[in-house]
Image: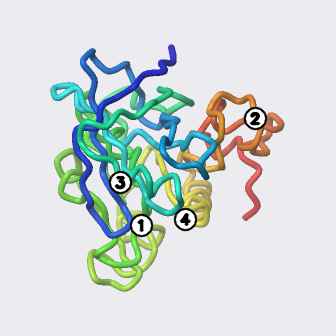
Amino acid sequence: MKKFLIDLRVKSVEQIHERYVLIRLTDEKPLPEMQPGQFVEIRVDGSPQTFLRRPISINFVDREQNELWLLVAAVGEGTRRLARLEPGDLLNCLLPLGRGFTMPLSADERLLLVGGGVGVAPLLYMGAEMRRMGVEPTFLLGARSARDLLMLDIFRRYGRVCVTTEDGTEGERGFVTSHSVLGQEHFTRIASCGPTPMMKAVARYARKAGVDCEVSLENLMACGLGACLCCVEKTIEGNLCVCKDGPVFNIQKLLWQD
């Protein structure tokens, strides 16, 4: 897929949580084609401490409004700078990067999309694209508490939403892998993104249940093109760059230790 280096204009910055902002970007021209699971490398201007671009998952693409949505966790100097952007600012973006999730081949497929924390970001676009194809996804979203669940109202536009919270303040109490939907229903495929321990737990469940599963890794990605080798992951095919050969991998390729 062709890559583009373009300046996108900030349309809005919404503080949706004390640690997260939703940035909507737009352009005078139609946005490039992007696939669920791909990401954007963003240049952070005005921050002398931030030398490298920041990789941000594609959260959503609104074709009608010609908008690209980025869900950003303001956890470091670079992302805190992004959270302070204002409407009208320009953001230099290299996109789309990486390999995304495998999309359904037929309406008969039953996909479970499992996310936690800011890892829910790419699953929204995937669910929306599935719905556009006539396939309704089931989302399984986890967080520490109800106040940490992100964008639930928007997820519910595109599919059924199941929720777990560690403190039981919303949905079922516990982790995503303890939700009752996993024992009550059969899914043909699972897609997951979030903290590594969560994805490893999802992978263990998928192996035991005999369900095909893909996960989106969040290794440190500096260049986004496979040149710097800082995001290498050990796989059955040798060391692969997460930014170029991923970030989405089938769990059968990964040499994760349970």
Which one is earlier in the sequence, the residue at label 4 or at label 2?
A: 4
Q: Residue at x 17, y 29 (%)?
A: 65
Q: From the viewer's perspective, is the residue at label 3 or at label 2 nearer? A: 3
Taking the view exactly as shown, the residue that stands out farthest to the bottom is: 167
Residue 25, percent across and down?
Answer: 29, 35
Which one is earlier in the sequence, the residue at label 3 or at label 2?
A: 3
Residue 119 or residue 112, whichever sits in front: 119
Q: Secondary structure at mark 3?
A: loop
Amino acid on which the number 1 mark rests in the picture: Gly
Disc sitting over residue 84 in the figure: 3
Q: From the viewer's perspective, is the residue at label 1 or at label 4 nearer? A: 4
Q: From the viewer's perspective, is the residue at label 4 or at label 3 nearer? A: 3
| Residue with the mark numbered 4 | 198
Amino acid on which the number 3 mark rests in the picture: Arg
User: Disc 1 to disc 4, how far (Cα)?
Assistant: 18 Å
| Residue with the mark numbered 2 | 228
Disc 3: CA contacts within 10 A as few (<14), some (14-19) or many (>=20): few
| Residue with the mark numbered 1 | 183
Residue 163 can be seen, yes or no? no
Q: Secondary structure at mark 2?
A: loop
